[in-house]
Amino acid sequence: MVTNSNGRESKKDPRIAGALSPPPFEETALASLTGEVEPRRPLRQPHERALFLLLMAGGLAAAALSMTNLRSDLDRTSWAVTYGPALMEMLAGWAAFLLAMSWSVPGIRVSRSRSALWCGAMAALALAAAFAAPHFVPAAHPGASVGFSPSKGFPCLGFEMMLGAPMLMAALWLVARGASAAPWLAGALAGMGAGLAADAAMHFKCADVDPAHTVIWHLGAVVLLSLLGAFGGRFLPKW
């Protein structure tokens, strides 16, 4: 009932009442929508997920090297062709994993130019290490004059692909937990991280320091894993 201008009570027009009052299901729908957008599982920070992948890579590399023959000259080879490049590539792999995990945060777009700059820097460091390695190994060294050889190259390529595959699958799983704005790019970066971590282990297995062998068979595995990651990323959820 409402009071008109004459002070008399009259019935409220039901059409006006329906137009002014909120829909009866509004609050229920709003509560349901709020509940739907709440995350079911917390998404870890990119650096935490990248650190997990780095620890996984180190564990897999240690396990794989313990089950295979190490280079026979490991005890008398300069750190510049073993521990130094291995540590550098592990850190570069962590940086690639970090970029991949950053790209997998829902709704977040990382600068493409910054990602390209980081990838270029990592590629330059890897190439510099490949061409600098012969200068730290004597010419008479047994592993210095092997040169480019498919018979020696394919085992190195296969070892890196087998070592990097589980790292790549784990990284793609972590990328899929989010909703990347560019899943193919996140996958490519994940593959690069897996390839660099796998190549770090090769410094303790392969004694060939010929740049052609290193670029084609070692860094070639990094490129292949990056391409596989980009291909796999195309099937991941996209923001």
Image (tube, rainbow, N blue to C red):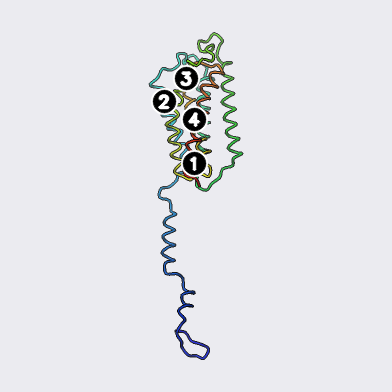
Q: CA distance from mark 1 to mark 3?
A: 34 Å
Quickly name the residue at label 4: 225
Q: Which residue is mark 2?
A: 62
Judged left or right of residue 129, residue 58 is left
Any mark on residue 114, and which? none
* Amino acid under disc 2: Ala
Q: Position of residue 116 (x, y in %)?
A: 59, 36
Hey, which residue is sitting farthest left in the picture? 67
Residue 166, picture quadrant? top left
Please, is residue 3 above or below residue 211 in the view? below
**Relative height, residue 117 to residue 74 (above, below):** below
The amino acid marked with disc number 3 is Phe
Pointer 4 or 1: first along the chain: 1
Q: CA distance from mark 3 to mark 4?
A: 15 Å
Q: Which residue is mark 1?
A: 46
**Among numbered discs 2 and 3, the one appearing first in the sequence:** 2
Contact flag, marks 1 and 3 (Cβ < 8 Å): no
Q: Which residue is identified by label 3?
A: 154
- Residue displayed at 59% across by 40% down: 112
As measured in the structure, the alpha-carbon distance from the residue carrying label 4 to the one carrying label 1 is 21 Å
* Other-residue count near label 1 (Cα within 10 Å), few / some / many at <14 / 14–19 / ≥20: many
Compute the Cα span from label 2 to label 1: 24 Å
| x 41%, y 64%: residue | 28
